[in-house]
Amino acid sequence: MHRYVLALHAIAATALLAPKRRRRAPTKDDGWRELSPPAPPLAPRTDYDWTSGAPTDAACWPSVSVVTITRDRADFLAEALVSMARQDYPRERVEILVAEDGPSAADNGAGAAPPNMDDSAGSEPLPNVRYLAHAARQRLGAKRNACLARATGELVATWDDDDYFAPNRLRAQAVELMRGGDVCFLGADAAYRFDVSDGEFRENRGGSFVQPCTMMFKRELWGPKTRYDDGTDLGEDLAFLDALLEGGASVATAEVPFVRVRHDRNVAQDAAGDGEEGVVAARAAAEACGLPARTVDFLAGLC
């Protein structure tokens, strides 16, 4: 069995040991308001034989809903949006759902607008961005479910506001799912971590750990029995993964470089794999993950 799949089963086993919560069914009015202008649902894809390679026609690519949750972190969110804008995926096939909660969520709605792209970003403005706001504080699981209840893409990509991915992330994972997978993760062989405490980039070496935060999955898998736990702030992604594996979902992996930021404002503190870590130069990490200079400067300014 593939070493990443073994790691996933180990993660799921840990989730199974945790106390089970009863997943709450969605309500008609969940308190979320969509502040962005209405947008039509993403169009279905054109049929294509994926065994013959990746298509050149954008209409053949599956639509993707990118799910991002945030709270009072407009600075982190702006850089995540830059990373999304640099994706080499057909723009008309992507929507981005940003869910923010708390008293200031409505005021921060402008923070989800596409940032002004300068030459260093090397990208046009973002595709369809849908901003959801809730006046009261919500758990992470509830925020993810709110996005999924409104998503129109065939595939869903989780993308936290302090994660930055190489430009081929969406394309590489979509190919794996179109070739038969149900869920696709990014492997630890391409994982980097930026630690705000010392300003260093670290590269995972030889690990087999895969992180749920890199997940892309078929939206049809999400439902009453396979939802994120609305009442959970830590491990909600592991419980969701557990439900998918219990339901027989097939797992694929893609080796796409990415950076996770370790800082005192995120819930999941450890972005390392189970292999050795080695400090690498900022330039090397930036080149591997396709980070623009503005994002590297932003990270340096956090220290």
Image (spheres, rainbow, N blue to C red):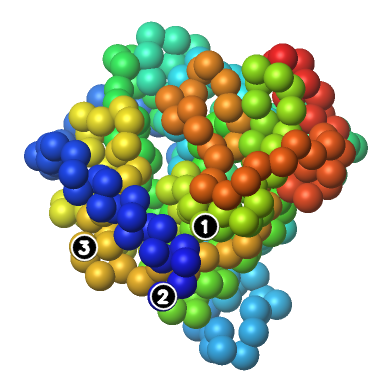
Mark nearer the viewer, 3 or 1: 1
> Could you tell me which residue is drawn at 31 percent across and 68 percent down?
249
For disc 2, the neighbor class at 10 Å (few under 14, some 14 to 19, many from 20) is: few
Mark nearer the N terminus (2 vs 1) = 2
Can residue 110 be seen by looking at this rendering? no
Label 2 to label 1: alpha-carbon separation: 12 Å
Q: Quadrant of residue 302?
A: top right
- Give how far across and how far down residue 78 sits, in percent: 65, 28
Q: Which amino acid type is marked by label 1?
A: Ser
User: Quick check: marks 2 and 3 in contact, CB under 8 Å?
Assistant: no
- Residue at 65% in and 17% down: 197
Q: Quadrant of the N terminus?
A: bottom left
Q: Secondary structure at mark 3?
A: helix
Residue in front for this viewpoint, 156 or 3: 3
Residue 105 rendering spot, x and y as whole percentages: 44, 16
Query: Which kind of residue does numbered mark 3 sit on?
Result: Glu
Disc number placed over residue 208 in the picture, else none: 1
**What residue is pinned by disc 3?**
246
In the rendered structure, the answer to whether residue 42 lies left or right of residue 75 reads left
What separation in Å lies between label 3 and label 1 (alpha carbons)? 21 Å
Q: CA distance from mark 2 to mark 3?
A: 17 Å
Residue under numbered circle 2: 1
Q: Nearer the viewer, mark 2 or mark 3?
A: 2
